[in-house]
Amino acid sequence: MTIGAYGFSAERFFAALQDAGVDTFLDIRQRRGVRGAEYAFANHGRLTASLDAMGIRYLHERDLAPTTGIRTAQYAVDAAAGVAKRKRESLSPAFIEAYRREILKPFDLQAMLDGLPAETRVLALFCVERTPEACHRHLVADAIHDLTGAPVQHLMP
């Protein structure tokens, strides 16, 4: 599974995770905070407390977050196109290429998957963007699918 915060209310976000049977939540953000009161539920402290209350384990894999340089290059593309970050529909080809080269290629996904708790059945990759195509989480999900054949579902608001 993948999920973003934008577009969800807190109630709908946690219900989507529960309805999908998620038991392990993998936060792949560099910074674990979100601006805006409507997304306070996705800030680390509140997020982990809510997940814990639901019986969903929380993990953070910062090494899967895009670097500041990769993100900054995407912001420049967004600005040139006049697209606000929360309205982005897709990542630039340059972001995708840099993310795959600088983050995914050196990262050992198999070791990460092997290191998940044995009882993991449904893993949700989390970042903030509304649509998976606008976020690096879909690149990670695709790489996991290519490695394992596991189906990928994107939870949407």
Image (cartoon, rainbow, N blue to C red):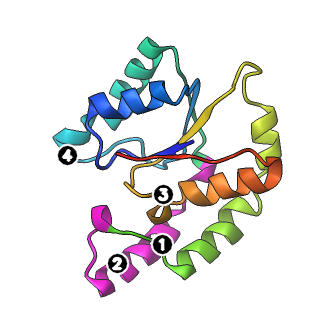
Crowding near the residue tagged with mark 2, few <14, some 14–19, many ≥20 C-alpha atoms within 10 Å = some
Specify the label residue 91 is tagged with. Answer: 1
The percent coordinates of residue 150 (x first, y second) are 74, 44
SS category of the residue bearing label 3 = helix
Q: Which residue is mark 3?
A: 132
SS category of the residue bearing label 2 = helix
Q: Which residue is mark 4?
A: 36
CB of mark 2 within 8 Å of CB of mark 4?
no
Q: Which residues are magenta?
A: 63-87
Is residue 12 shown in magenta? no
Amino acid on which disc 4 is placed: Gly
Q: Nearer the viewer, residue 30 or 88?
A: 88
Sequence order check: which comes first, mark 3 or mark 4? 4
Q: Which residue is mark 2?
A: 78
Q: Nearer the viewer, mark 4 or mark 1?
A: 1
SS category of the residue bearing label 4 = loop
Q: Nearer the viewer, mark 3 or mark 1?
A: 3
**Helix, strand or loop: magenta stretch:** helix
Amino acid on which disc 3 is placed: Pro
Specify the label residue 53 is tagged with. Answer: none
Residue at the spot 45% in from the left edge and 15% down from the top edge: 54
How many labels, in total? 4
Looking at the rendering, in which quadrant would you find the C terminus? top left
Sequence order check: which comes first, mark 3 or mark 1? 1
The residue lying furthest to the bottom in this view is 80
Residue at the spot 37% in from the left edge and 80% down from the top edge: 76
Alpha carbons under labels 2 and 4: distance apart: 20 Å
Sequence order check: which comes first, mark 4 or mark 1? 4
The residue lying furthest to the left in this view is 37
Q: Quadrant of residue 99?
A: bottom right
Measured along the vertical axis of the image, is residue 150 above or below residue 71? above
Q: Nearer the viewer, mark 3 or mark 2?
A: 3
